[in-house]
Amino acid sequence: MCKKVCIIPARGGSKRIPKKNIKPFYGKPLIAYSIETAKQSELFDRIIVSTDDEEIAKIAKEYGAEVPFMRPKELADDYSGTDKVTKHAIGWLESIGEKYDYVCTIYATAPLLQAQYLVEGYEKLKHSDAVYAFSVTSMPFPIQRTFKITKNGRCEMFFPEYYSARSQDLEEAYQDAGQFYWQKLSKKSDEPIFGKDSIPIILPRHLVQDIDTLEDWERAEKLYKILQMEKIQ
């Protein structure tokens, strides 16, 4: 029987949206949605929230997650990547004699996450020789026809050779959906997670929304409301 652990990183120092991880989102703290979806999937032996914040820890426990340790300060600044936080949690588990076959890192800011995609990611990774499986979504417009705004306020294409190309003739591109990341702990890879050792779990764009600004937050709430209305109908 494969052992699987879920790690939800949730530091307390959000600046653009203060206390973002526990800010009320449709009547519940934002982190509650990630915890509840992880539980709904029925995949995990343990669901652990890695945090440096006592208030986040208290709320996480109220919604059914464990907080068996407090994250060290050196892993709770603006520069601490998710991979380091996950490695710390796995190291802590190993230090108490617990070994896992798979870890799934779920962001605390994923209220649109659905359990079926967690299950899909696990099943596809389990039956493959890949190291990772993570959520992705398609870009809404061909990246080959994108441009930047220069310092003098003018436009400059990233790929000017595609200026005259038809959108339907250009290769589709995908982006990280920022919801979950499965890893097979028995295998190692020198590839980046966006590389050849990863399986993409494709989500429809209406289930994907970064939450970095208040505008993002408002859009996520509107998407969530629409999804709830569709479930009722």
Image (cartoon, rainbow, N blue to C red):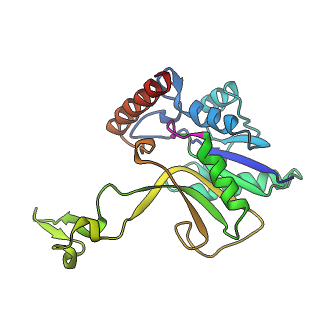
User: Picture coordinates of residue 26 (x, y %)?
Assistant: 47, 23
Frontmost residue, 201 versus 151 = 201
Question: In the displayed structure, would residue 57 be above or below residue 173?
Answer: above
From the viewer's perspective, is residue 51 above or below residue 181?
A: above
For the point 57% across and 32% down, which residue is it? Answer: 33
Residue 98 image point, x, y percent: 86, 51
Mostly what secondary structure, the magenta segment? loop
Q: Residue furthest bottom?
A: 161
Seen at 10% across and 61% down, the residue is: 153
| Residue 110 included in the magenta stretch of the image | yes
Would residue 195 be seen by someone viewing this image from the given angle? yes
Tell me which segment is drawn in magenta.
Answer: 109-114
Q: Residue at x 30, y 65 (%)?
A: 143
Q: Is residue 69 at least partly visible in the picture?
A: no
- Residue 145 location, quadrant: bottom left
Left/right placement of residue 20 relative to residue 193 reads: left
Horizontal and vertical percent position of residue 182: 65, 56
